[in-house]
Amino acid sequence: MKHLADLLFEARILKVIPRSGFSFLGVGKESVAEHVYMTTFIAFIMGRMVNGIDSEKLISMCLIHDMCETRTGDLNYVQKIYVTAHEKKARQDMLQKLPFGNAMDDLMAEFNEGRTVEAQLAQDADQLSLVIELKHLSDMGYKPPEKWMPHVIRRIRTPTGKKLADAVINREQDAWWLDSYRENRPDDEDG
């Protein structure tokens, strides 16, 4: 049980590790845990959009895809040019004493390899999480996200990921509530 408690404490660290790319963007911020939540929620939706996939595997992959960042930190695309994270070693050290460590290792490796449909959807969910953040910042009036968006969109590979990206890009970030917003004033008919 102590190894399970250790894993839980380690997972908690993701709440305080910042996503490093936002410093290059010049605006916005997000913890790795916030990113993982959004990625996993996107995967939950994708799992209902695509028939014949293992939705539990897809969601599980997304839930743990950045777990090694507790040990390696979050390296953005610029940093990865100069720094190599030893993720396989981090996974081994993190998972070796867990009764289900091999299952977690297999999921992380499958995500990284990106060969299965579930892994491709998981990778797209990972990118869609960033698309949503960039769209939010762009809708708030910031210009730098508009430069980044085409690069992120090009990373999306699945038809489902592309459809979701298109929907996000072509929708205002506050439309979910603003489209049906109506002030309840005394002079309203229903008021």
Image: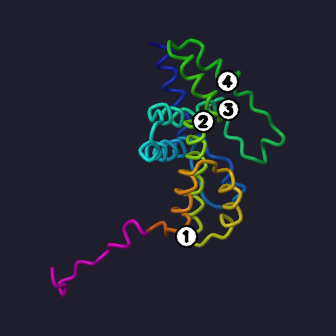
In-image side of 67 versus 81 (left or right) = left
Counting from the top left corner in percent of width and height, residue 23 is at 69, 54
| Res 69 label | none
Asked whether 72 falls inside the magenta stretch, the response is no
| Res 66 label | 2
Give the residue type at disc 2.
Asp
Report the predominant secondary structure element of the magenta stretch: loop
Q: Nearer the viewer, mark 4 or mark 3?
A: 3
What residue is rendered at 53% in x and 51% in y? 160
Q: How is the image coloured?
A: rainbow
In-image side of 61 versus 83 (left or right) = left
Q: Nearer the viewer, mark 2 or mark 3?
A: 3
Q: Give the camera-side residue of 125 and 75.
A: 125
Q: Secondary structure at mark 2?
A: loop
What residue is rendered at 52% in x and 62% in y? 168
For this orientation, the residue located farthest to the bottom is 187
N-term-proximal mark, 2 vs 3? 2
Report which residue position mark 4 lands on: 90
> Decide: marks 4, 3 in contact (CB < 8 A)?
no
Query: Magenta segment, which residues?
Result: 175-191
N-term-proximal mark, 4 vs 2? 2
In-image side of 101 versus 175 (left or right) = right
Counting from the top left corner in percent of width and height, residue 99 is at 50, 12
N-term-proximal mark, 4 vs 3? 4
| Res 139 label | 1
Q: Give the camera-side residue of 154 and 137.
A: 154
Q: CA distance from mark 4 to mark 3?
A: 17 Å
Q: Secondary structure at mark 4?
A: helix
